[in-house]
Amino acid sequence: MAAGGVAVFPADTVYGLACHPEDKAAVARLYALKGRPAAQPSAVMFFDVAPALAALPDLGARTRALLERLLPGGVTLLLPNPAGRFPLACAADPHTLGLRVPAASLLAGVGVPVLQSSANLSGGPDARRLEDVPAAIRAGADLLVDAGELPGTPSTVIDVRRFEATGAWAVVRAGAVAEAVVADAVAAIP
């Protein structure tokens, strides 16, 4: 990652593509490999909750409490981003940041965040196995990490941008974590 590489790696849900979140050339390579439009955002993935929270000091207490209930896990949270952190991941919407902390990963010891997206062609099926990752993506990546077959359901995407002020949240994409589980986590926040 530090040298501008792009990796195919196993998350807790599906195989993903990752690169350094502040390396413009690496992000452009990742997007080109996927055929992803440049204006479409990606997520920033941390491999532990504590560094994720430390990197986002602008989050309010209620939002932090919700993150601590949902992470790590099979969710991607759309958060307010008033400081414009990780602009390459935010793409056309610098005021929204997608955050992901996987529940389990071979990369649990990685201490730095990565910009990540699923290891598929844009709009294509998610990869449960390394061999399900399109050949062109595997050939164009600098590192392939094989962890065998994964569950295959992508993360649940949850919009919590207004949660701090109003308690509002919405599931944008159904996935690995059921909406009822999210509702229970929300209900536990004072």
Image (cartoon, helix red, strand yellow):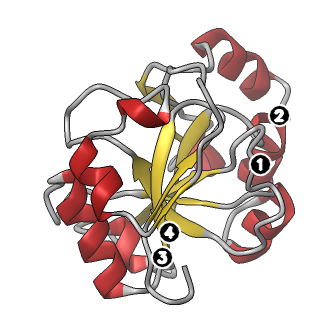
Q: Residue at x 17, y 66 (%)?
A: 38
Name the N-terminal-most of marks 1 and 2: 1
Q: Position of residue 145 (x, y in %)?
A: 59, 51
Q: Residue at x 22, y 31 (%)?
A: 124
Q: Amino acid at mark 2?
A: Ile
Q: Amino acid at mark 4?
A: Asn
Q: Find disc 2 in the rendering and name its residue.
A: 189
Q: Find disc 1 in the rendering and name its residue.
A: 62
Mark-to-mark CA distance, 2 and 4: 21 Å
Q: Secondary structure at mark 1?
A: helix
Q: Badge 3: few (under 14), some or many (20 or more) residues near its Cα, within 10 Å?
A: many
Q: Amino acid at mark 3?
A: Pro
Q: Position of residue 14 (x, y in %)?
A: 51, 32
Looking at the rendered image, the quarter that the C terminus falls into is top right
| Label placed on residue 81 | 4
Q: Nearer the viewer, mark 2 or mark 4?
A: 4
Mark-to-mark CA distance, 1 and 3: 26 Å
Q: Nearer the viewer, mark 4 or mark 1?
A: 4
Mark-to-mark CA distance, 3 and 2: 31 Å
Mark-to-mark CA distance, 1 and 2: 7 Å
Q: Badge 4: few (under 14), some or many (20 or more) residues near its Cα, within 10 Å?
A: many
Name the N-terminal-most of marks 1 and 3: 3
Name the N-terminal-most of marks 3 and 2: 3
| Label placed on residue 21 | 3
Proximity of marks 3 and 2: CB atoms separated by less than 8 Å: no
Q: Position of residue 8 (x, y in %)?
A: 47, 54
Name the N-terminal-most of marks 2 and 4: 4
Q: Is residue 42 left or right of residue 25?
A: right
Proximity of marks 1 and 2: CB atoms separated by less than 8 Å: yes
Name the N-terminal-most of marks 4 and 1: 1
Q: Residue at x 65, y 37 (%)?
A: 147
Mark-to-mark CA distance, 4 and 1: 15 Å
